[in-house]
Amino acid sequence: MEFRLARVGVVVIGRNEGERLRRCLQSLDPVSRPTAYVDSGSSDGSPELAASLSAEVLQLDMSIPFTAARARNAGLERLLKNSPEVELVQFVDGDCEVDPAWFPTAAATLDSQPDAVVVCGRRREKYPDASIYNRLCELEWDTPVGEAQACGGDALMRVSAIKAAGGYRDDLIAGEEPELCVRLRANGGRVFRLASEMTLHDAAMTTLRQWWTRNVRAGHAFAEVSHLHARSPFGIWKREAWSNWVWGVIVPVLAIVPAPLTWGLSLILLLAYPVLYFKIRRGRRQRGDDSTTAGLYARYCVLSKFPQAMGQLRYWRNRVFGRRNRLIEYKGPRTSR
């Protein structure tokens, strides 16, 4: 099928992205391609910037609790209202730039496989050497190609499939894309990750606190999404959620709490962490990482078990006490590059 720009629309979400948003929209060519930008309370002139670059701008009512899922649903609704001919929609975060070759490549994959409903490609960190934490993002996104269980925030999706699944869950504060993929797959759809370049992302993550908070959010997502689909054969993150409990809660408690009663012998259990480190490091080496990179990834992967366990505990605390889950944000105010 011939690639036509009008078949593909774009939904961009963001807040106070500044020059990142400019680069994002310029990479999308909103003049030629239907593009909706959803703003969530920016104070840096982002809506005006987006409008000047020919994007359709929608400003969310911030009196209603914000989630990225809600923003994406609102953006898709506006996009289809103005451009009902759109068949495929690219979701992208406002701090990302889309590779110019991505759209025809991804659209061709969906056209060639009728049961394919989501296609994503390589997401790269734009400044991987700016900090350890940016580098960790780059490593995290280096995932196997082929059929996948889920996608991230950047992906090209079939509009008819999204409608059939009911769209994103507005109330999820994290993990909304993999959760949608569970329902898409339950409806008979397939998700594919291509080796093709898709987006450049600017994490702008420079502190341990940002990295820690991002992992708290990840743990919250593991807990909520795995619980939502605990009985589904297409459910995800059960293994991740269990791993967080084991390494972030159970092992420390069993090692430290009885230590006074065991003359410290129970602390031997803490030796399990070096074992876990070397297991992860070996796995990364087998995938082709050099020794330094494999060690970096393994070290922070072990450390991440603790904030991720905190995220899970936060989810279950809120669920038990009937509290609303609040957004967990790790990004500070944006500065220009």
Image (cartoon, rainbow, N blue to C red):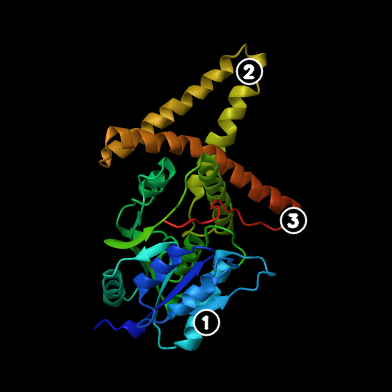
State the image coordinates of residue 330 (x, y, percent, origin top left).
Answer: 55, 51
The residue that mark 3 highlights is 322
Give the CA distance from mark 2 to mark 1: 59 Å
Q: Position of residue 175 (x, y in %)?
A: 52, 58
> Helix, strand or loop at disc 3?
loop
Q: Residue at x 61, y 73 (%)?
A: 60
Q: Quarter of the image holding residue 248? A: top right
Q: Where, by quadrant of the figure, is residue 44 drawn? A: bottom right
Direction from residue 252 to residue 234 in the image, left or right: left
In this rendering, is residue 149 above or below 287?
below
- Residue under pointer 2: 259
Residue occupying the far top of the picture: 263
Q: Nearer the viewer, mark 3 or mark 1?
A: 1
State how far apart marks 2 and 3 are (Cα): 35 Å
Q: Given the image, on which type of amino acid does mark 3 rest?
A: Gly
Residue 78: image tag? 1
Q: Residue at x 52, y 82 (%)?
A: 78
Label 3 to label 1: alpha-carbon separation: 33 Å
Badge 2 crowding class, 10 Å Cα cut-off, few under 14, some 14 to 19, many 20 or more, is some
Q: Is residue 130 left or right of residue 322?
A: left
Q: Give whichever of discs 2 and 3 has the lower sequence position.
A: 2
- The 10 Å Cα crowd at callout 3, few under 14, some 14 to 19, many 20 or more, is few
